[in-house]
Image (cartoon, rainbow, N blue to C red):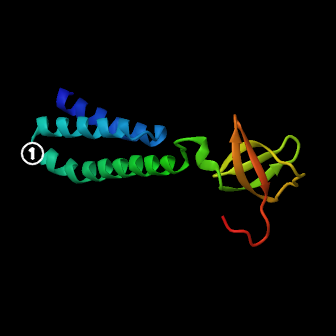
Amino acid sequence: MSQELCLLLAGVGLIVLDCVLNTGIVAMIGVVCAWVGAYLMGTKYLIATLPPGAFVLLMQVAAVLRRTEESSDVLLKSVGELKGEEGIVIREDPLLVKVRGEPWRAVSKTRLRRGERVVVLDVKGNKLVVKRRKTGERR
């Protein structure tokens, strides 16, 4: 088997492997390997692999960008950003609230029940200071 064909098949194998790993980087390397292998084999192979390769590459880039965008929505620049955010009590003892989709330990002057809505007043260390959200209260 020629080296060019091995390179082409290795590229296809890497693309298939990335379907399992779901990183995107392995598929991009696979696309490059497949293109180089096809280029070295001749023009007719390059023409045959170019559209599917470009499609896979664009889909992987889109997936990586989407994943990056989704994760940046969750990350905080500082915990101070949580002040004024709404949350919900998910456990009473010890008090645990979910704010922005993440569980946080919390303290409150009043007893809170599971399922109650709360507002973050302050952040003390790794705990949120919360109060019960009054019905009709706006942030």
Residue 132 or residue 15, whichever sits in front: 132
**In the rendered view of the protein, which quadrant contains the N terminus?**
top left
Q: Amino acid at mark 1?
A: Thr
Determine whether, in the image, residue 91 is placed left or right of residue 34: right
Residue 13 or residue 138, whichever sits in front: 138
**In the rendered view of the protein, which quadrant contains the C terminus?**
bottom right
The picture places residue 79, in percent across and down from the top left corner, at 61, 42
Q: Quadrant of residue 113?
A: bottom right
Q: Which residue is at a point 75% across and 46% down the rendered structure image?
A: 129
Residue 2 visible in the shown view? no
Residue 75 or residue 39, whichever sits in front: 75
The picture places residue 32, in percent across and down from the top left corner, at 24, 38
Residue denoted by label 1: 43
The picture places residue 5, in percent across and down from the top left corner, at 21, 33
Q: Secondary structure at mark 1?
A: helix
Q: How many marks?
A: 1
Q: Which residue is at a point 69% across and 34% down the rendered structure image?
A: 125
The picture places residue 7, in percent across and down from the top left corner, at 23, 31
Q: Is residue 50 above or below residue 13?
A: below
Q: Which residue is at a point 41% across and 39% down the rendered structure image?
A: 18
User: Residue furthest toward the left?
Assistant: 43
